[in-house]
Image (cartoon, rainbow, N blue to C red):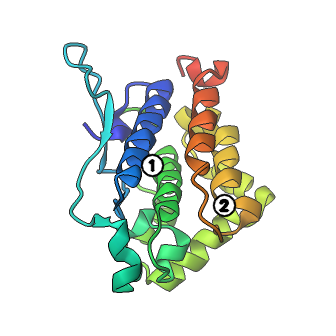
Amino acid sequence: MPIYKASSRSALLAAFERCIEGHESLHRAGLLHRDISINNLMINEDDDNLSWPAFVIDLDLAIKESRKAASGARGKTGTRAFMAIGALLGEQHSFMHDLESFFWVLFWICIHYDGPDKDRAVPRFDKWNFMDTEELAVSKTGVISNEGDFRRIVDGNFTSYYQPLIPWINRLRKAVLPNGRRWEQEDRGLYARIREILQEAGKDPQVLAER
């Protein structure tokens, strides 16, 4: 089932960690996914079948990384609301764009879901699905560029269920978008740093609490 249906906050974080591991495996195999989105990250909480507790699906837009430079293909590929800022601006796609998309998926879930299956409309962010790509890049940059502004946005828009994740989402923002800016150099170590933050968040008593 889609990752946003995770039965708990800790289950959601663990599923994100597993999906990022899966994405890293794809990257090591030379594949770029290019469409990390809320419906392409899956969680399996079936006690009778735990062989794949979480995984990435839909490789329809995936390409061999070796073709990236040869073709000169540029970005603007993916599900708009979750696309990395650089991809929205047409940068050549990188695994770093996909890692930023993981951040935007988690950000989206924390705004739109007040627990499993309790979704809501949030017009300010729902319009991200339809905005011009360059306009959306500016909007996303405004969200992440200043820590104080970011904290005000998440404090005011995260559902009560996901409020305990706020400090951890902010740490992810700093890791994925250092100094409030889109990345400038590829960094394979980012996979491990993201997983470490997710692991620490999953141990937070506030995150583990019932509500």
Residue 64, x across and y down, in percent: 31, 66
Secondary element at tag 2:
loop
Residue at (26% x, 67% y) in the render: 61
Camera-side mark, 2 or 1: 2
Disc assigned to residue 198: none
Q: Is residue 193 above or below residue 68?
A: above
User: Which kind of residue does numbered mark 2 sit on?
Assistant: Leu
Q: Is residue 103 above or below residue 35?
A: above
- Can residue 96 be spotted in the picture? yes
Instruction: Check the picture and name the quadrant holding the N terminus.
Output: top left
157 lies left or right of 30: right
Residue 19, x across and y down, in percent: 39, 41
Residue 6, x across and y down, in percent: 37, 31
Q: Earlier in the sequence, mark 2 or mark 1?
A: 1
- Can residue 77 be spotted in the picture? no
Q: Is residue 166 above or below residue 101?
A: above
User: Which kind of residue does numbered mark 1 sit on?
Assistant: His
Tag 1 residue:
112
Residue at (37% x, 40% y) in the render: 4
Disc assigned to residue 177: 2
